[in-house]
Amino acid sequence: MKFIELLFEGTLWNSRFVILSAVIGSLLAGFTIFYMATVDVVILFQHAFHYADGSMTEEARKVLHDSTVSHIVEVVDGYLLATVMLIFSLGLYELFISDIDQAHGSKASSKILVINNLDDLKSRLAKVILMIMIVTLFEEAINMHISQPIDLIYMGGSIALIALALYWSHAAEGRHGGDDSDMTHDEKTEQ
């Protein structure tokens, strides 16, 4: 009976390795989005290179300027989404498989990539997703055509809600100690 129990528990414990499919898939998706955003930057630079062209009319220059700003916001959005996928992939690996030794052992490594529990992963993902929402709102605000006074109220309300979300996320970070959990008591007191 003990043998069957050990065999079952071993199988159950090793079933956590199924998470590697999500880790690898998320990592590949992140790399794909990084690649696409970088290609967008190269194409954007090629188009923006013509901005100083003397044969360009003022109206064409204005259209190029506005489309360039809009595309830059899209690129930032792409990089943020790729970052979400990277953090998600590293977090799943640390939670279910093993700690990443390079992330914990080096003083130069970013602490945002060190995931200690599910709340850490949720918190880091929520921060990046909030930033994606802010960038998306900014992108929509750039392309928004105000036709009625109520449109201004809607835009102001959305900005106020985003500001409130940022305030709450910052306040919650302060309540839980933020990212300074690896600081000593004396270092925290100095701040």
Image (cartoon, rainbow, N blue to C red):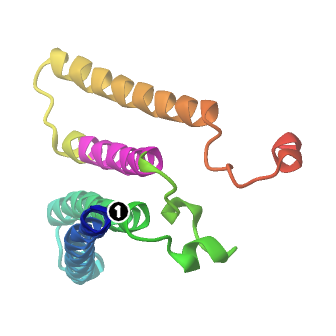
Asked which quadrant contains residue 171, the reply is: top right
- Residue at 38 percent of width and 63 percent of height: 87
* Residue 58 drawn at (x, y percent): 21, 63
Q: Which residue is mark 1?
A: 92
Residue 58 vertical position relative to residue 24 in the rendered view, above or below: above
* Residue 116 drawn at (x, y percent): 52, 55
* Residue 133 drawn at (x, y percent): 28, 43
* Residue 62 drawn at (x, y percent): 21, 59
- Residue at 20 percent of width and 77 percent of height: 32
| Nearer to me, 5 or 67 | 5
Q: Secondary structure at mark 1?
A: helix
Magenta stretch in the rendered image: 119-138
Residue 166 vertical position relative to residue 94 in the rendered view, above or below: above
Q: Is 96 placed left or right of 30 in the picture?
A: right
Q: From the image, which quarter does the N terminus lie in?
A: bottom left
Visible residue check, residue 30: no
Is residue 24 found inside the magenta-colored segment of the image? no
| Nearer to me, 138 or 145 | 138
